[in-house]
Amino acid sequence: MDFKELAENLELEENEFLELIGLFIKTAYSDLNKLQSAIEDVDTDKVARFAHSIKGTSSNLGLIGIFECAKRIEMSVQNNDLDGVTGAAKRIKEQLDRIAKALAKNER
């Protein structure tokens, strides 16, 4: 993952971007856990809320893959179709794990 390029796209210094990514990872994991619980409880309001939160922040940071998955979840809920939301949540987690791993490597 090219943090420097992502930072430049947002007109930020790389160290500022890395700090934001670190905060995002913590918040996104928390929101993702709540999202997964809401999916299990079939609480569509909470599913939409947590997907929207993840979508907004990932968009602001240029994390398009996470944005697309969260958007897919949000749209599914709006269409009263929860098929596939578990898979999209899993893909968000995989991408968060990949970013967290890249961030840890970058901090060494």
Image (cartoon, rainbow, N blue to C red):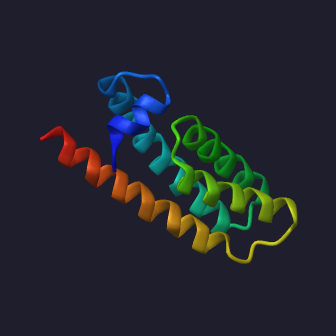
Residue 44 found in image quarter: bottom right
Using the image as rendered, state which of residue 92 and residue 7 is in the foreground. 7
Rendered view: 42 above or below 5: below
Figure disc tally:
0
Left or right position of 92 against 77:
left
Q: Position of residue 28 (x, y in %)?
A: 49, 46
Question: For the point 71% across and 52% down, which residue is it?
Answer: 46
Q: Say which quadrant the C terminus sits in.
A: top left
Using the image as rendered, state which of residue 59 and residue 83 is in the foreground. 59
Question: For the point 22% across and 46% down, which residue is it?
Answer: 104
Residue at the far left: name it.
Answer: 108
Residue 66 found in image quarter: bottom right
Using the image as rendered, state which of residue 1 and residue 18 is in the foreground. 1
Rendered view: 50 above or below 81: above
Left or right position of 87 against 7:
right
Question: For the point 42% across and 55% down, which residue is it?
Answer: 96
Q: Position of residue 50 (x, y in %)?
A: 65, 48
Rendered view: 68 above or below 53: below
Residue at the far right: name it.
Answer: 79
Residue at the far bottom: name it.
Answer: 83
Question: For the point 86% across and 68% down, which residue is it?
Answer: 80
Q: Position of residue 94 (x, y in %)?
A: 43, 65
